[in-house]
Image (cartoon, grey):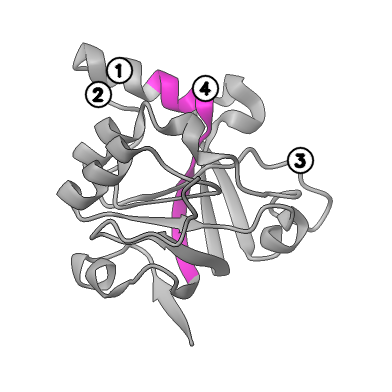
Amino acid sequence: MTKKITLPLTDEVIKDLKAGDSVLITGTMLTGRDAAHKRLFELIEKGEQLPVDIKGEVIYYVGPAPAKPGHAVGPAGPTSSYRMDKYAPALLDRGLKAMIGKGKRSPEVVESMKKNGCVYFAAIGGAAALISRSIKSCETLAYEDLGTEAIYRFTVEDFPAIVAIDSEGRSVLVEK
């Protein structure tokens, strides 16, 4: 059974999500990739204010392709999440509620998720054009100079994902 969830996520919804659950996500989320995460992390290290409020947010690891006429974005498939692992615990400690990407996460990220009551969703790699259909609008919020790696706010409807790691650290990701 697929669970329909609406953003922002509440602690109750997060606790109800279990590794392996299929979800359709509706609401608004942030986006960000390596370069944006590095900048956010550097601000946190300096004790400075972030350009976006991440408390209660979901961040999708994506660098969307340019939009064709009549579309909010072009193909928008997930980026490999491990590239954000160095930065994720600091963001989770500041209130980030969920991450969306592809692939495994480090033990440090999983421990931070458990500590902070967060969830990691996996989006399907290779389905960028399909995923982009669920993105209804796109607004640039910060770091426009990074192009596709800027921080955007997506409005999504029925964004398909799977709970890859739940708030208790259970995972569907295969260990090697």
Residue identifier under label 1: 43
- Given contact means CB atoms under 8 Å apart, are the residues at marks 1 and 2 in contact? yes
Residue identifier under label 3: 66
| Residue at 64% from the left image edge and 65% from the top image edge | 134
When the figure is inspected, residue 23 is found, relative to residue 75, above or below; the finding is below
Q: CA distance from mark 1 to mark 4?
A: 13 Å
Q: CA distance from mark 3 to mark 2?
A: 29 Å
Q: Is residue 121 magenta?
A: no
- Given contact means CB atoms under 8 Å apart, are the residues at marks 3 and 4 in contact? no
Residue identifier under label 2: 49
Other residues around mark 4 within 10 Å, as few (<14) / some (14–19) / many (≥20): some
Instruction: Name which residue type carries label 4.
Output: Ala
Give the mark, 1 or 2, whose residue is nearer the N terminus.
1
Camera-near label (4 vs 2) is 4
Residue numbers of the magenta segment: 25-39
Give the mark, 1 or 4, whose residue is nearer the N terminus.
4
Q: Position of residue 4 (x, y in %)?
A: 45, 79
* Residue with the most extreme bottom position: 1
Residue identifier under label 4: 35
**Mark 3 residue element:** loop
**Mark 1 residue element:** helix
Q: Position of residue 105 (x, y in %)?
A: 42, 42
Q: Nearer the viewer, residue 36 or 124?
A: 124
